[in-house]
Amino acid sequence: MTPYLLGFIGHFSFALTALSFLMRDILFLRVLAAASCFLGIAYNYFLPEGPLWLVIFWLSVFTLINLGRIVLLFLEKRSIRFSDEERELHETLFQNFSPVEFMKLMNLGNWHKSSEGELLAVESEPLQDVKLIYNGEVEVERQQQVIASLRDGTFIGEMSFLQGSSATATVRTKRPTRYIAWSTDELKKLLKRNPTMDIAMNTVFQLDLTKKLATSPVPGK
């Protein structure tokens, strides 16, 4: 193997590792990590000074681990059936959840449909759940003044959940709205038992808050 080709393989191996760190989809991350390890094995085997067996051994271990996880992820996806609503949420807001993690989250939630003018949160009162608007529209009021309007794909109560505080605003449906609600206590227990889900959920909340900051001077509800 020529030095040029060997150098290319080495650089490409590290490039795949770097790219895997950017992946939000865990399956793509595993595939890129396995490919990186495989190229790393080839690079260390064809070195002019001879194979580096210690490095090759551990890269082989990492490759097997990633391949095993890829197989398990495929089996998980085949064993789980999402409804159309769940599939849409998983492919948009909850991409960083594995199918099993997302199904755990969905099983914990309850779907609701509210009529126009229904209160979903009251300013300064404790919130018993975190809500996600699936389809509809709500108005956010503070001190009886409308300060924002929220639509599909936004949360209600995530700031109170993160801070452990009461609602900072009143939220009222502007039109019939379908949403999913998670009990605050039960959601905390679920995330405590599943650290990776806790990280993923906090990422989802932070993205939601960032989106609200970009469209409204008030970051929360």
Image (cartoon, helix red, strand yellow):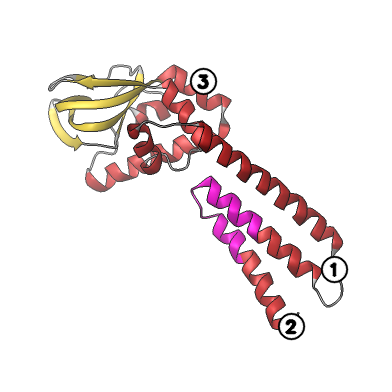
Q: Which residue: 27% across, 32% down?
A: 134
Q: Hey, what amino acid is under mark 2?
A: Thr
Query: Is label 2 in contact with label 1 (beta carbons under 8 Å)?
Result: no
Dot 3 or dot 2, earlier in sequence: 2
Task: Quote the CA–CA distance across marks 2 and 1.
Answer: 15 Å
Task: Quote the CA–CA distance across marks 3 and 1.
Answer: 49 Å
Quadrant into which the N terminus falls: bottom right
Q: Secondary structure beneath disc 1?
A: loop
Query: Is label 3 in contact with label 2 (beta carbons under 8 Å)?
Result: no
Residue 189: assigned label = 3
Instruction: Say above or below: 29 vs 129.
Output: below
Q: Which residue: 68% across, 79% down?
A: 5
Q: Is residue 22 magenta?
A: yes
Give the side of residue 65 with respect to residue 23, left or right. Answer: right
Crowd class of label 3 (few under 14; some 14 to 19; many from 20; radius 10 Å): few
Q: Who is closer to the viewer here, 171 or 97? A: 97
The magenta region covers 15-35
Q: Which residue is mark 1?
A: 51
Q: Which residue: 24% across, 26% down?
A: 178
Q: Which residue is mark 2?
A: 2
Q: Image quadrant of residue 16?
A: bottom right
